[in-house]
Amino acid sequence: MEEDALPPYEPVTCAEQRTVKVVPHPVQQYDLFQLPKYNKTWHAHIIRCDEKGSEFPAWKMPSVYTVGSLPDSHCVVVVTSRIRQKFNEIYRQYILREVEAGDDVFLDIFTPNNKNIEKYGLEAAKRKTRSDVLGRAVEGVATTGLALYRYYMKIIPVNSDRLPLEWALLGYHLGVSEPEVRDQFTLLSLLLELHFVQDLNSDDVSQLLEKKGQDGWEKYLEMRASLATENIVENTDEEMHEILLVRGLLEFAGHQARVLYYQHDPEGTPQDQERTITDSCRILGRALRCVFEAKDEGESERSNRMHGRMQIPRPLGAHEVRERLIQSGYSNIEISELSVNLPIFLPIGIPVPYRETLPATLVNGLKRKVVMDAITVISDTYMLHLPALRGEENHIMMFLLYLVKNGLEPEVTTAWMNSTEGQSIYDRTLTRMREQLQSLEQSILCLNTLRAYLYLLDPPEPAIEPVYACYLGDFTYLLHGDTQINRRSVLEVVAGSAQKTLIRLPPGVAQIAMPITRPPPVHWCDGFVDRYWQHRSNEAMTHEEAYRRTVLSVASTLPFLIQHGKIVS
């Protein structure tokens, strides 16, 4: 039989079909520690886990973080953009899909799984799940910082759930701040705390200045983050305002961070706009009280300290506070500069020079936005229109005119005007207009300040005849403190006549003139008031001098005016 011919020199190949099973790369944290650390941008993945969740660890590292578990036991993990590709290559068998911010999956991480519901009950399981997710987030933000915080802010929509992250970020910035910043931050805290203490010479104050509460802020911020994690905060606006106050204090101390602090957003929230300086001081004061609380303080000591604490603090930069710190060795210049500049960073005061000239009893009870808007208008009026009026004694009159003309805070303003301090300003304005040499602008400012007082304090009056023969006579009696005449009507008549002289003044003079609410009654002696303002517009003079000249100029025809002129002789 003929054999089959074989190729003489060709190799023979044998093939065998096999099934190869690919074994997933075991999940090891070691792999991730070898990857670069860069946490600017984060990306989320849903990772497959078994029912026990044992295959995938809860990672807490600079570049990889487990956000939470889903009801189906899978996990949401975020990784930084720097390691994203490498992570996907190593763990592609575990990655189910990527998710973007806004995906409903981030709401699902707050939904408890069946196992926890069976174990704790529905409501307790909800609280535990929330606490676990936010506790993990707080730990991540506290160690990683701003980038992870920003990512969480994208995926967590509820303000009460965001609060723990705000506290954690604040603690992170305090922790990474430079030593000199922390020292300045402590000094600022001490400076503010002393504004709340009644007895600045007490032993408690001496101990406070010695210890300086260097570790109090860290523990306080951790405590606030923990409380906001464990319980839903009802008044999120007030707590967020406290965070903004402490952030502003830290930035004033010199810490630079890419976070919107309070002064970068002067409008704030609607709630911030409604707050007074006193409101902000009280909120910050509660924090300072906890920060400087002694570790071993008992109930009796705490009660005594609370009793010696002022609910409404001293005006910012109070002399006695500065003196106490100077006695403890701090520089006079440094303490003075801190007091002057604090309101730039915190809504707990007003800028110099208005802080020394506007009464804190009025200013601190007004919405701070109203106060700052008034200061802006006053400053612009001085600079653009009436520089001759720039003077400390005029600040309060300009301020009151702004409030009354614009109908702002009438209840607070009226209560202050009725106070002893408010009445002293009214009396001082009477004296100034009666006895000081005044320019036309200055006399119009004083006149309209009186009108602002009576607009709020005196009820509207019917137009009636003068009490002392003519309105100029009534006006003179009014400046001497007479309260029997129709003060509001008299000032309306005198102001109406003064308006005829305003054409000689810059257009901005309208800022110091109250509007005429009703036409003044026509009276046979109106010309005397017009003559009075003609004298005042010619040169600076007192009311008494202007009144005397007016009386003399009409004495030949109206002898009885001389009799009334004797009250100013």
Image (cartoon, rainbow, N blue to C red):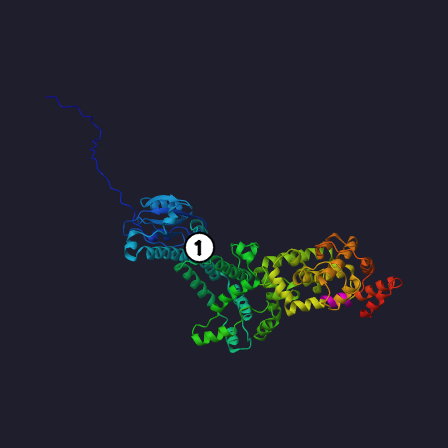
Q: Quadrant of the N terminus?
A: top left
Left or right for 314, reference 234: right
452 and 363: which one is in front?
A: 452
Q: Which quarter of the picture shows residue 163?
A: bottom left
Which quadrant is the C terminus positioned in?
bottom right
Characterize the magenta stretch by its predominant secondary structure. Answer: helix
Q: Is residue 298 visible?
A: no
Residue 88 rendering spot, x and y as whole percentages? 36, 45
Work out whether residue 475 or residue 158 is closer to the camera in this orientation and state it. Answer: 475
Front in this rendered view, residue 19 or 440: 440
- Is residue 458 located in the magenta-colored stretch of the structure? no
The furthest residue to the left: 1
Q: Which residue is mark 1?
A: 162
Picture coordinates of residue 190, whole percent (x, y): 53, 69
Instruction: Report which quarter residue 539 is drawn in.
Output: bottom right
Direction from residue 7 to residue 250 in the image, left or right: right
Q: Vertically, is 374 above or below 101? A: below
> What is the crowding at mark 1: few (fewer than 14 residues within 10 Å), some, or many (at least 20)?
many
Q: For mark 1, give the secondary structure.
A: helix
**Residue type at the position of mark 1:** Arg
Residue 234 image point, x, y percent = 44, 58
Report whether residue 305 is seen: yes
Residue interval drawn in magenta: 429-435
Residue at 76% of width from left, 59% of height from top? 494
Q: Which quadrant of the figure has residue 274?
A: bottom right
426 relative to 323 in the view: left or right: right
In the image, residue 109 lies at what x, y percent? Answer: 36, 50
